[in-house]
Image: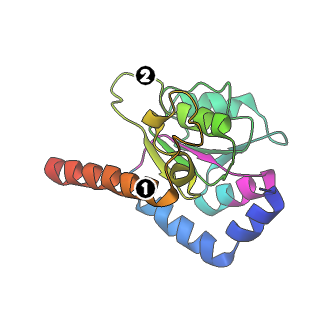
């Protein structure tokens, strides 16, 4: 995907209004948002009043504030996908489509670090990467063509996964 094409798709008034309303409806948690380019990161950051971190704004203080919990959300591009360790991440919102399984694994992995009091990390995928690659527990070794599920089979599995989590949430409420 080209980052310009992605920006055309997402950087619209309608998407911006939807995303801001959606984000504001979420329970406050340490959130990492992945975007496809700097312009989009800055735009999303301005919509939800969040700090951005990328090659044009790489102030380490932003990272430190996020890791200490002083900043609830950080919006990033490439630099936060690999080598970034903030175990307190409780939610990832993916606005960055990719055809790369290794990159997607790295993005999911940002929320998989252990942290006292953290028992899970929400992964909200706006881009359908989960539909394309499957659930994280399927990442153990890349699948061959024969092992890959069709999109219809994967959607069924993803729906069952989220239905289970919805039931679990209903039980907890």
Callout 2: few (<14), some (14-19), or many (20+) C-alpha neighbours within 10 Å? some
Q: Which residue is mark 2?
A: 114
**Residue in the foreground of this view, choosing between 166 and 20:** 166
Q: Quadrant of residue 104?
A: top right
Q: Which residues are magenta?
A: 28-43
Vertical position of residue 20 compared to residue 54: above or below: below
Residue at 63% x, 27% y: name it. Answer: 64
**Residue 8 point in image, percent of width and height:** 76, 69
Q: Is residue 153 left or right of residue 66?
A: left
Residue at 47% x, 29% y: name it. Answer: 112
Ranked by sequence position, the earlier of labels 1 and 2 is 2
Name the secondary structure under disc 2: loop
Indicate which disc residue 153 carries: 1
Of marks 1 and 2, the one in the foreground: 1
**Residue in the foreground of this view, choosing between 7 and 47:** 7
Q: Is residue 29 left or right of residue 141?
A: left
């Amino acid at each position: 995907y080209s980052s310009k094409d992605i920006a055309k798709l997402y950087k619209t008034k309608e998407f911006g209004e939807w995303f801001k309303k959606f984000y504001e409806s979420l329970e406050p948690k340490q959130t990492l948002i992945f975007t496809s380019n700097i312009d989009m990161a800055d735009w999303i950051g301005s919509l939800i009043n969040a700090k951005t971190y990328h090659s044009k704004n790489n102030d380490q203080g932003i990272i430190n504030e996020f890791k200490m919990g002083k900043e609830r959300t950080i919006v990033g591009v490439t630099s936060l996908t690999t080598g970034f360790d903030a175990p307190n991440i409780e939610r990832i919102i993916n606005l960055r489509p990719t055809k790369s399984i290794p990159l997607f694994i790295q993005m999911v992995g940002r929320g998989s670090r252990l942290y006292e009091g953290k028992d899970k990390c929400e992964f909200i995928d706006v881009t359908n990467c989960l539909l394309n690659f499957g659930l994280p527990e399927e990442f153990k070794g890349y699948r061959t063509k024969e092992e890959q599920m069709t999109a219809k089979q994967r959607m069924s599995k993803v729906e069952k996964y989220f239905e289970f989590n919805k039931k679990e949430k209903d039980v907890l409420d």
